[in-house]
Amino acid sequence: MIAIKNLKVDLGDFLLNNINLEIDSGEYFIILGPTGAGKTVLLEAIAGLYPVLEGEIWVEGREIARLNPEKRRIGIVYQDYSLFPHLSVEENIAFGLKLRKCPKASIKEKVNDIAEIVGVTHLLERKPQTLSGGEQQKVAVARALVTEPEVLLLDEPLSALDPETKEMMQQELREVHWRTKVTIIHVTHDFEEAIALGHRVAVLNNGCIAQIGAPEEILRQPNSEFIAHFALSRNIFTGEAEEGEDGHACIDVGGIKLRGVTDLRREVRLSLRPEDIIISKEPLHSTARNCFEGVVSDIAHRGAVVYVTVNVPPNFICLITRQSFEELELKKGVRIWITFKASAVHVF
Amino acid sequence: MSIVFILLGVIILLFIFVPLLKTVSSSSPGTLWNTLLDEEVYSSILLTIYAAMIATLVGLFLGVPLAYLLARRQFWGKRFLEGLIDIPIVIPHSAVGVALLFVFGSNFLAGKIFHSVGIVFFNSVAGVVIAMIFVSIPFLIDSAKEGFKAVDVRLERVARTLGASPWRSFLRVSLPLAWRSIFSGSVMMWARGASEFGAVLILAYYVPFFGHYARVAPILVADRFNSFGLDYARPVTAIVILISLIVFIVLRTIAYRGEKA
């Protein structure tokens, strides 16, 4: 297990402060946050490349916060992969083993094994400059894993890749994780990447951890407006929560009454995910508690899906498939109905 | 515009090459060969090559670590220090000779310390070497510094996480990657040292060298001209130019081998 306790790191302009994390052995853990949130520095502090002001870092029962990087048994893969340009792929992967003075035969065997796992066996003779981004990343992962670190740190490993390669590399990372069972801490600013890979996600903002939870939890139950925004929950409102029927809360948002599930009875913030809203030409007779009529005020095409803004008011941003969009014959100015469940309204 | 620029460029190139070519071509190969066999000439050339090489090796040992610190660390007064390193380029070299004599002469502190271990600088090869180091070290430090700056610090960090100590990371990653800049800086340092006149003239004019007495090549050329005139100075000048060019071209070719233009 990895436990980070009250970690404090000086970032120059601001502090990485009061960082507390517990990560299970073998977990795929994501640290998610916007650019400048301190994600890379947090990774470098864990790896021993950035000085820790206060706090402890425990890895499998060893406190390592003051150890030199070479004593920590923590591997890192940077965004630009940082392969040694003067060494071949094979020499890059063998770098850590040679430092440990492993016998030659054993180095050869280990390099071949890990090269097979990440799928770079055919590249061993090549120089890093001749590889594609995806290939370089695989080599960087192999180089870090071959020394059998207790934790593998990945710093925005997919952000420099084109969308297709990115998707393929996500699969590769899942596969490598499954085969090696190594604990991974993966830093990203991409929410969808976090959901696709992480067992759990910690959201970092301004040097502090804003929320930790399973991806679904971050998605459905953001604990702040920042996270709701970051998790692409496009509909975020403020309203007054009062007692409604059937134990539901009735929340007054700009003149309309939303039904939600909460015990809070005060001014609240609430978020509603665009994909949880159903659009129809007639009012829907369903168990869903919230049904409003509005006017289509904006349409944004995003490939296979379409974001439709419906002014009730307030504006609701809804996500529908292209097929539904065409069936509903939506245009700006058309009057339609939106419907969503009380349980889709997340109050915080 | 290009035509004007090319013409101006041709003028400066002719200015550099015509005197060199004229000097070299005005002596017959036979005369050059005989001049080369002159003991005063060949021992002078060997002394110059040897002393500049020792100066460059000392420069590598003492200058490369400083270059690394300047490339990697931020500290108060760094700009000032970087300016200080380039000072030898602007000081008149005869003044450098006097200043060095003032510190490394047998009557002064540094001179006394070295004297106690048997190293004397006045009129000795060691004196030639320190004069050369002083005037040429900025070329090596500046070039090595740029070389280290070009090495991504993340490469060193990755090496550390893979188990390298700071020393190992320096020797296995930073040094090999900055090597080309360090080598080309060394070539510049060697060339600048070998061509030094003023500082050597004052500190070590005539030095014992492998059983003979010798002067560095630039001083030999000046002496021959002052004592015997242009005609007598020409063959030795041609020899010095030829050897300097050959060594310099060979070293630069090695330094830039494999690099794309």
Image (tube, grey):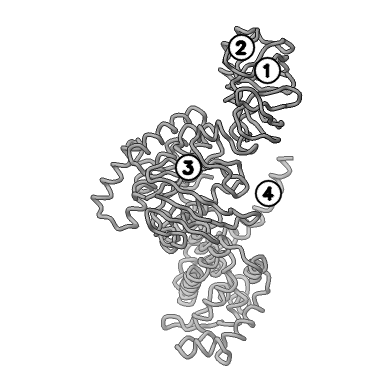
Q: Is residue B74 visible?
A: yes
- Choose between B100 and A199: the one closer to the eye: A199
Q: Earlier in the sequence, mark 3 or mark 1?
A: 3
The location of residue A6, given as percent across then percent down, is 53, 56
Instruction: For the residues labelled 1 and 2, say whether their Cβ atoms are less than 8 Å apart.
Output: yes
Amino acid type, residue under disc 4 in the picture: Gly
| Quadrant for the C terminus of chain A in the image | top right
Instruction: For the residues labelled 3 and 1, say whether their Cβ atoms are less than 8 Å apart.
Output: no
Q: Mark 1 highlights which residue?
A: A299
Marks 2 and 4, how far apart in space? 68 Å
Tell me where residue A293 sits by quadrant. Answer: top right
Tag 3 and tag 1 share a subunit: yes
Q: Mark 2 highlights which residue?
A: A325
Q: Mark 4 highlights which residue?
A: B9
Tag 4 and tag 1 share a subunit: no
Tag 3 and tag 4 share a subunit: no
The chain that hosts pointer 3 is: A
Residue shown at 62% from the left, 14% from the top? A279
Numbered disc 2: secondary structure: helix
Numbered disc 1: secondary structure: strand
Marks 1 and 2, how far apart in space? 10 Å
Tag 2 and tag 4 share a subunit: no
Marks 3 and 4, how far apart in space? 55 Å
Residue shown at 46% from the left, 50% from the top? B257
- Choose between B16 and A117: the one closer to the eye: A117
Amino acid type, residue under disc 1 in the picture: Ile
Q: Earlier in the sequence, mark 3 or mark 2?
A: 3
Q: Mark 3 highlights which residue?
A: A186
